[in-house]
Amino acid sequence: MLMAALMTAAVAFAPADDKKTDKDAPEVRKLDQAILKDVKIMQAKPGVVVYSSEEDVAKAFDKDAAAAVARAVDFKKEEVAFVNYQVGGPPFGQLKFNADAKEKSVEFYVEEPKGGGIRGNAIRLGRDLYAIPKGTKATFGGRK
């Protein structure tokens, strides 16, 4: 009972730490987190969903979020990757990604914290939007 209360109280949105590992890799950029501020999202499983138009974003979220995304993304050249993830802690892992030029892909994953410690007393839910080049394969690699 106490564990459930702690987990519920500790639910928050986790920040992402991005990195581009290959100088020729697809350009991946994080969109402003405020776009999702008022959006209710019911996707429970961690993963990546790619949206290729403003209409797709409006169907998934709402018209206000879609308009904000459309101001930040050029849908002629880019798509939007919605990354949903969760981490246990503290200490909490961080969302990162590897972009690969050869495969024209990007893999999002949660990097587990270094060192030991007891973890799992709380859960942190994360959801982020990224602009990725059109045609880039986006996947979620889980925890590493």
Image (spheres, grey):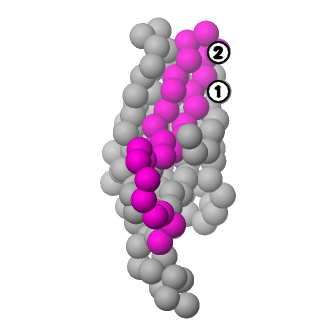
Residue appearing at x 63%, y 63% in the figure? 44
Circle 2 residue: 103
Measuring from the top left, give residue 85's x and y in whole percent. 55, 53
Say which quarter of the image contains residue 64: bottom left
Q: Which residue is mark 1?
A: 137
Q: Residue at x 41, y 48 (%)?
A: 115
Q: Nearer the viewer, residue 38 or 2?
A: 2
Extent of the magenta region: 94-121
Report the residue that reaches farthest toward the bottom: 1
**SS for tag 2?**
loop
- Residue toward you, 69 or 50: 50
Q: Amino acid at mark 2?
A: Glu
Magenta run includes residue 21: no
Considering the image in quadrants, where does the N terminus appear?
bottom right
Left or right, 135 with respect to 12, comes to right
Inspect the image, locate mark 1, and give the three-letter code of the amino acid beneath it.
Answer: Lys
Residue 70 seen in render: no
- Decide: few, some or many residues near mark 2? Use Cα within 10 Å; few <14, some 14-19, many ≥20: few
Q: Residues within 10 Å of mark 1 (few under 14, many from 20)?
A: some
Residue 111 visible, this orientation = yes
Q: Position of residue 3 (x, y in %)?
A: 51, 82
Give the secondary structure at mark 1.
Answer: strand
Observer-nearest residue: 135 or 124?
124
> As displayed, is residue 91 above or below residue 76?
below
Please tell me whether residue 65 is drawn above or below residue 1 in the rendered image.
above
